[in-house]
């Protein structure tokens, strides 16, 4: 037998598309192809729906949008007539269903080679759970055929196709040599482990190696971490791309020349996977940066209270956008303590950003006067507290309207769970960094960022970002004298464990009581969680990091009498 080898170089193009910007996405594909060509690639594999951006949601109902995608795809395909690498690109694509003869829309993978679209495969398993609604917008295609490139029989799948056995089995039966998977797989804590756990049974079932290409970047509530990889037919990781950054990485595949022996991938670089806290922090930074930049804002503005939530939100914003694009405003009331003033100023100095003070005292006096006659005989309560919060909201929105930065809302997941936030007050804003981050995780991330220095690729200071006291002092809303969060809520470690069970674990009240939690506390938290749904529906979007984020993932009725 000859010891010469057949050789195929497959480049993994982990790029950051923008939903709806078809021309820019096609240009990114071109740039990645040029990069891959310079690295000797024969084929460049891109993420799911890279031409439209993922997820395109109802945008794909517009024929004009599909026409634009189709024109861009045909232009890219024509360019592969130059003898350079072939492209494997995801796009929404209209097709005629062979079973019923009807025109449908599929989530497709297009193989472009030799100046034409040589092969079209469609996603077979459409995810319709959690954040995914693909049955609503796409039809499943027929089970895909295999296609040959430079003698290698490629089995092409689209994302969810790898999460069930059917498509892999079909491709293996057809005689595939290598499985290629185009993905739009959003980040969740510890998701990278799940991807590998789902890839391995497919690989073992088929006895075939697998190439997994995921996108990076933020799209509204979703953020994609990339972390594309190659797994050998033995289930071992052969190569892994870095997370949270664009990358075009070639992998070299060989087999004995002229034989029908399996293709194997030569060892490729194995980028380290970040630990949990770093991954969450990077998700928040990328989610915010892409939201602000892709929507064309000059920067963000937020209320800096001297508390931990606004301090961490400001730190994430500075790491995402740089200090010159983040504006913080301290808005003291008569209840604002000296410590809060010092701590807010400390945060601003450490982050090196623009910091202003606007006293809300005159606004509160004005409302006291305006409402005095109508409120006569009523004792002060949360009504007056909420007016303070709303005076801050109005101030931030006025500065946003006048100067253009988007207001960043600072509430965390613990508060959003129990409705501990004021509608049109501290809930106002365009985007919320911490919306899906429990308070105990806020504390952990703050310690992490203070100890870590600037994470690679970020724009903030290489040192601590908030005074230690901001992390260690008891949380307070400072809406009345000596107020502490724990006056109204269980201590956050207790609250977060219960919320984690009710939300992430979908556990019942009785399960949590049986697990040893205090009966009355669990009942109270469950009640608050239920009655705060109306607030969450009016809350700004924020970066999803958990299994069950409010908004896209966890959708409960507002009008809901079930209390069991
Ligand atoms: N199902 C439903 N559908 C639609 N609307 C509903 C509703 N239930 C009540 N509402 C309305 O919602 C209003 C109550 O909500 P809202 O006005 O937000 O006020 P509310 O929830 O009563 O008070 C805000 C709470 O957030 C706490 N908090 C914590 C931390 C920071 C801050 C801060 O502001 O900085 C505040 C504050 O201590 C207080 O407990 C009611 O007046 C009612 O009209
Ligand atoms: N004195 C203040 N100056 C500026 N902004 C404020 C002030 N007080 C509250 N805010 C804004 O309202 C948000 C909610 O504040 P509050 O302090 O009441 O609750 P919190 O959830 O403990 O937040 P934090 O930890 O940031 O204080 C803050 O994150 C901040 O954006
Ligand atoms: N786009 C998709 O099909 C994604 C679904 C898949 N289970 C994932 O999260 O990775």
Image: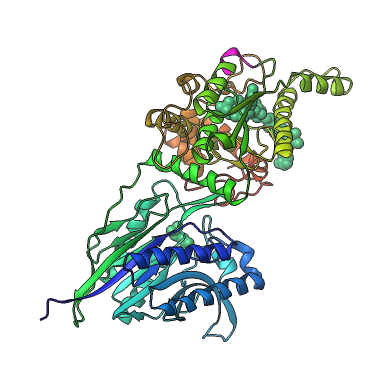
- Position of residue 203 in the picture relative to residue 437 (left or right): left
Q: Is 564 positioned to the left or the right of 260 in the image?
A: right
Quadrant of the image occupied by residue 404:
top right
Give residue 44's position: percent from left, percent from top. Answer: 38, 68
Image region (quadrant) for ligand 1: top right
Does 427 appear above or below 37? Answer: above
Q: Residue at x 63, y 20 (%)?
A: 478
- The verdict on residue 399 being magenta is no
In the rendering, at what x and y percent does residue 463 appear?
41, 28
Q: Nearer the viewer, residue 549 or 428?
A: 428
Q: How many numbered circles are shown?
A: 0
Q: Could you tell whether 232 is left or right of 13 in the image?
A: left
Considering depth in this image, is 444 or 351 the residue closer to the camera? 351
Please tell me which residue lies in front, 137 or 10.
10
Classified by dominant secondary structure, the portion drawn in magenta counts as helix
On the question of residue 369 being in view, the answer is yes
Image location (x, y in percent) of residue 121: 45, 76
Most extreme residue toward the right, as rendered? 373
Q: Quadrant of residue 394?
A: top right
- Give yes or no for residue 337 being in the magenta stretch: yes
Magenta stretch in the rendered image: 336-340
The colour mode here is: rainbow
| Residue at 52% from the left image edge and 37% from the top image edge | 322
Q: Residue 223 at what x, y percent from top left?
A: 49, 50
Q: Is residue 15 above or below residue 557?
A: below
Quick check: 279 above or below 232? above
The residue that appears at 48% across and 56% down in the rendered structure is: 16
- Image quadrant containing the N terminus: bottom left
Q: Which quadrant is home to the C terminus?
A: top right
Q: Inspect this view and state whether residue 510 appears.
A: no
């Amino acid at each position: 037998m000859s010891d010469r080898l057949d050789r195929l170089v497959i480049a993994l193009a982990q790029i950051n598309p923008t939903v709806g910007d078809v021309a820019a996405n096609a240009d990114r594909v071109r740039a990645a192809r040029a990069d891959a060509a310079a690295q000797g690639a024969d084929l460049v594999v891109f993420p799911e729906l890279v031409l439209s951006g993922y997820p395109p949601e109802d945008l794909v109902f517009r024929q004009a949008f599909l026409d634009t995608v189709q024109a861009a795809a045909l232009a890219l395909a024509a360019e592969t007539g130059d003898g350079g690498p072939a492209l494997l690109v995801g796009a929404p694509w209209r097709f005629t269903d062979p079973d019923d003869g009807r025109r449908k829309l599929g989530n497709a993978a297009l193989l472009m080679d030799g100046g034409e679209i040589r092969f079209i495969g469609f996603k077979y398993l459409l995810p319709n759970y959690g954040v995914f609604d693909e049955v609503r917008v796409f039809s499943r295609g027929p089970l895909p055929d295999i296609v040959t490139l430079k003698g290698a029989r490629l089995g092409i799948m689209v994302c969810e196709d790898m999460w069930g056995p059917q498509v892999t089995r079909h491709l293996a039966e057809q005689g595939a040599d290598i499985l290629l998977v185009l993905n739009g797989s959003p980040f969740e804590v510890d998701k990278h482990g799940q991807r590998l756990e789902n890839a391995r049974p497919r690989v073992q079932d088929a006895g075939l190696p697998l190439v997994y290409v995921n996108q990076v970047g933020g799209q509204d509530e979703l953020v994609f971490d990339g972390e594309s990889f190659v797994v050998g037919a033995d289930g071992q990781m052969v190569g892994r791309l870095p997370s949270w950054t664009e990358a075009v990485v070639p992998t070299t595949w060989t087999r004995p020349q002229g034989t029908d022996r399996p293709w194997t991938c030569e060892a490729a670089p194995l980028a380290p996977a970040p630990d949990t806290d770093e991954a969450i922090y990077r998700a928040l930074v990328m989610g915010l940066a892409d939201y602000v930049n892709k929507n064309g804002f000059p920067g963000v503005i937020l209320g800096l209270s001297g508390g931990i939530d606004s301090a961490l939100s400001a730190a994430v914003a500075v790491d995402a956008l740089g200090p010159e694009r983040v504006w913080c405003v301290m808005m003291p009331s008569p209840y604002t303590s000296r410590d809060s003033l010092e701590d807010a100023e400390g945060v601003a100095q450490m982050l090196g950003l623009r910091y202003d003070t606007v006293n809300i005292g005159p606004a509160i006096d004005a409302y006291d006067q305006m409402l005095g006659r109508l409120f006569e005989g009523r004792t002060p309560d949360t009504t007056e507290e909420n007016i303070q919060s709303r005076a801050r909201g109005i101030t931030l929105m006025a500065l946003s309207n006048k100067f253009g930065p988007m207001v960043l809302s600072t509430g965390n997941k613990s508060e959003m769970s129990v409705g501990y936030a004021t509608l049109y007050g501290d809930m106002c804003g365009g985007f919320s960094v911490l919306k899906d981050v429990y308070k105990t995780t806020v504390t952990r991330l703050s310690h992490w960022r203070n100890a870590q220095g600037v994470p690679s690729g970020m724009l903030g200071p290489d040192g601590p970002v908030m005074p230690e006291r901001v992390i260690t002092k008891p949380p307070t809303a400072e809406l009345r004298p000596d107020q502490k969060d724990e006056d109204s809520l269980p201590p956050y470690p207790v609250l977060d464990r219960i919320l984690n069970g009710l939300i992430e674990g979908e556990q019942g009240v009785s399960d949590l009581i049986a697990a040893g939690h205090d009966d009355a506390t669990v009942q109270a938290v469950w009640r608050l969680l239920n009655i705060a749904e109306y607030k969450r529906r009016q809350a700004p979007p924020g970066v999803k990091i958990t299994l069950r984020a409010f908004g896209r993932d966890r959708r409960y009725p507002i009008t809901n009498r079930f209390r069991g």
